[in-house]
Image: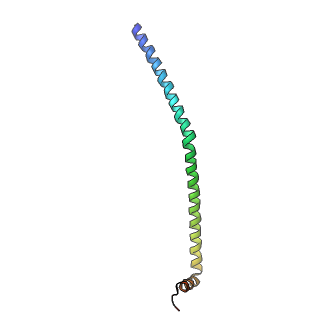
Amino acid sequence: MAELRTTVAVDVAVSAQHRDQSEARFEAIERTLSQEIKPQTEEWKRMKTIGLGFAGLLALGGISFGAMLAYASDTAVNAVRHWLRIGG
């Protein structure tokens, strides 16, 4: 019976030690996430937002240019022909 009590006591002590080590590892991982990874993901989000804004600006410019050409198509055709020296 004494051997059984010793084994149980040792097993409980080992379990407590593993739990403490697991908590320390979890805290280290959590610290790494908050200090190193989170700022990087925020930077990528900011870069994505800037890129989408720039793409939207280019799309708006392209649509505006196309609308201007459609509105002034006769004049644009004559201007291009003049620049390329087509026709007389």
Give the answer, above or below, for where 36 lies relative to 4.
below
- Percent x, y of residue 29: 52, 35
- Percent x, y of residue 40: 55, 46
- The mark total stands at 0
Q: Which residue lies furthest to the bottom in this view?
A: 88
Q: Residue at x 56, y 66 (%)?
A: 59
Which of the 4 image quarters holds residue 31?
top right
Q: Which residue lies furthest to the top in this view?
A: 2
Image quarter hosting the N terminus: top left
Give the answer, above or below, for where 67 lies relative to 81.
above
Q: Residue at x 51, y 25 (%)?
A: 20
Give the answer, above or below, for where 52 lies relative to 79.
above
Q: Residue at x 54, y 36 (%)?
A: 30
Which of the 4 image quarters holds residue 83?
bottom right
Q: Which residue is drawn at 57% across and 71% down?
A: 63
Q: In this view, does 11 lie to the left or right of 62?
A: left
Nearest the eye: 56 or 24? 24
What color scheme is it? rainbow
- Percent x, y of residue 58: 57, 66
- Percent x, y of residue 75: 59, 84
